[in-house]
């Protein structure tokens, strides 16, 4: 005996007007009907046509009927077929407001409606209790590995769509081109950084995600490498960061956030341990970092900026004292002193070789 699935297409039929509302469910027919009744009784159903008819004829004038039970992958396709057949999105025949199953494509809302919905949502989310309950619910939901996997697949599929990527890029470019919007976004990012630091102190950090999710760190590393291999992307990031830090107060704000983060001694120790482990176990990472550092310091402009920043930094007595404590602690370890000595010797050898090569090239050019 085959048990019919509890997913499929249904209709809410008005026996007085003969009109119907076509819908589909993936959570069960009874549960979906109860959810419709709940919002209809509160006079807040998303379909104004159905809500007006419900208010006019009463609850007893409506019947909930299962049109067809079908497995989940085919629900939306079947719903679209019924929508087209009954034309329930036409006000003369039904109460649906969307002609496309599963979304609101084709529906244009007025500015007044958008403003009303925005104000209503902001009023709801301004309640700390509601935000707290939503946070607990989402955290509990994301503890399920299957939920995380499905969301990851959906987001990856969505962002692989060229149209979606182009729309996102255009929208963000338009937002960041507005000075007021850019200032608002910058303030939110700074606040997010502070919130992340508070969460990190409580044990909620991205490090936990990387340590508990197999392959997460490798996937993120591979994605970063692929992004930075794109010259256009790299140029945009560098240009954007340069423009941001040229703004008055931007460097000071970033410096304040970094100082706040690194004021935690335990965090500094953990980061130092992670860095040592990463470079000891991965010679390639050491080579890449060294190459990048040499490339940055190879230009007189970058060296001048670094020198000026260090001089300004050491003008602060607190900074000097803090750096002195760090260096004293570091060189009190014999093994650390030996490593630093080897690094200095290696750097002097590299400098001598580079100087000899430059002199040889100059003499060849003269001859």
Image (cartoon, rainbow, N blue to C red):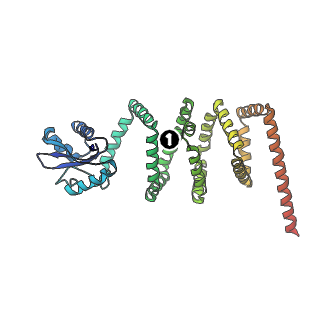
Q: Is 177 located above or below residue 198 in the figure?
A: below
Q: Is residue 165 shown left or right of residue 5?
A: right
Residue 38 visible? The answer is yes
Q: Residue furthest left?
A: 16
Residue nearest the viewer, comparing 98 with 286: 286
- Quadrant placement of the N terminus: top left
For disc 1, the neighbor class at 10 Å (few under 14, some 14 to 19, many from 20) is few
Q: Name the residue furthest front.
A: 1
Question: Residue 314's image quarter?
Answer: top right
Left-right relation of 289 to 257? right
Specify whether 154 is left or right of 15: right
Whole-percent x and y of residue 102?
32, 50
* Residue appearing at x 58%, y 55% in the figure: 226
Image height check: is 66 above or below 317? below
Which quarter of the image is occupied by the C terminus? bottom right
* Residue that badge 1 annotates: 188
Q: Nearer the viewer, residue 144 or 354?
A: 144
Q: Position of residue 311 (x, y in %)?
A: 74, 42
Q: Image quadrant of residue 81?
A: bottom left
Looking at the picture, how far across and down is residue 101, in whole percent?
A: 29, 52
Q: Residue sitting at 55 percent across and 42 percent down?
A: 214
Look at the image and tell me whether residue 107 can be seen: no
Residue at position x 31%, y 41% in the image: 27
Q: How many marks?
A: 1
Residue 301, how many percent across, how many down? 72, 54
Q: Secondary structure at mark 1?
A: helix
């Amino acid at each position: 005996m085959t048990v019919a699935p509890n997913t499929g297409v249904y209709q809410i039929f008005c026996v007085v007007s003969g009109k119907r509302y076509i819908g589909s469910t993936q959570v069960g027919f009874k549960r979906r009907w109860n959810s419709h009744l709940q919002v209809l009784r509160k006079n807040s159903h998303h379909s104004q046509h159905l809500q007006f008819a419900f208010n006019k004829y009463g609850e007893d004038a409506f019947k909930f009927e299962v049109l067809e039970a079908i497995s989940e992958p085919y629900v939306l396709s079947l719903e679209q077929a019924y929508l087209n057949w009954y034309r329930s999105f036409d006000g003369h025949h039904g109460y649906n407001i969307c002609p496309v199953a599963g979304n609101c494509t084709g529906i244009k809302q007025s500015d007044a409606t958008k403003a009303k919905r925005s104000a209503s949502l902001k009023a709801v989310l301004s309640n700390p209790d509601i935000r707290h309950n939503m946070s607990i619910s989402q955290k509990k939901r994301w503890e399920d590995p299957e939920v995380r996997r499905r969301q990851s697949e959906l987001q990856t599929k969505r962002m692989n769509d060229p149209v979606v990527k182009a729309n996102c890029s255009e929208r963000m470019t338009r937002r960041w081109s507005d000075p007021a919007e850019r200032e608002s976004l910058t303030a939110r990012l700074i606040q997010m950084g502070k919130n992340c630091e508070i969460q990190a102190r409580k044990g909620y950090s991205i490090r936990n995600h990387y340590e508990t999710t197999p392959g997460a760190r490798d996937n993120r590393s591979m994605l970063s490498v692929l992004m930075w291999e794109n010259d256009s992307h790299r140029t945009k990031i560098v240009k954007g960061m340069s423009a941001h830090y040229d703004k008055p107060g931007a460097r000071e704000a970033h410096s304040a956030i970094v100082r706040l983060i690194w004021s935690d001694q335990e965090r500094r120790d953990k980061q130092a341990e992670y860095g040592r482990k990463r470079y000891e176990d991965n010679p390639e990472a050491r080579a890449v970092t060294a190459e990048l550092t040499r490339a940055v310091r190879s230009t007189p402009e970058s060296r001048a900026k670094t020198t000026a920043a260090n001089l300004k930094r050491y003008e602060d007595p607190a900074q000097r004292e803090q750096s002195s404590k760090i260096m004293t602690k570091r060189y009190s370890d014999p093994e650390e002193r030996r490593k630093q000595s080897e690094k200095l010797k290696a750097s002097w050898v590299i400098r001598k070789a580079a100087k000899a090569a430059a002199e040889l090239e100059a003499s060849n050019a003269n001859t």
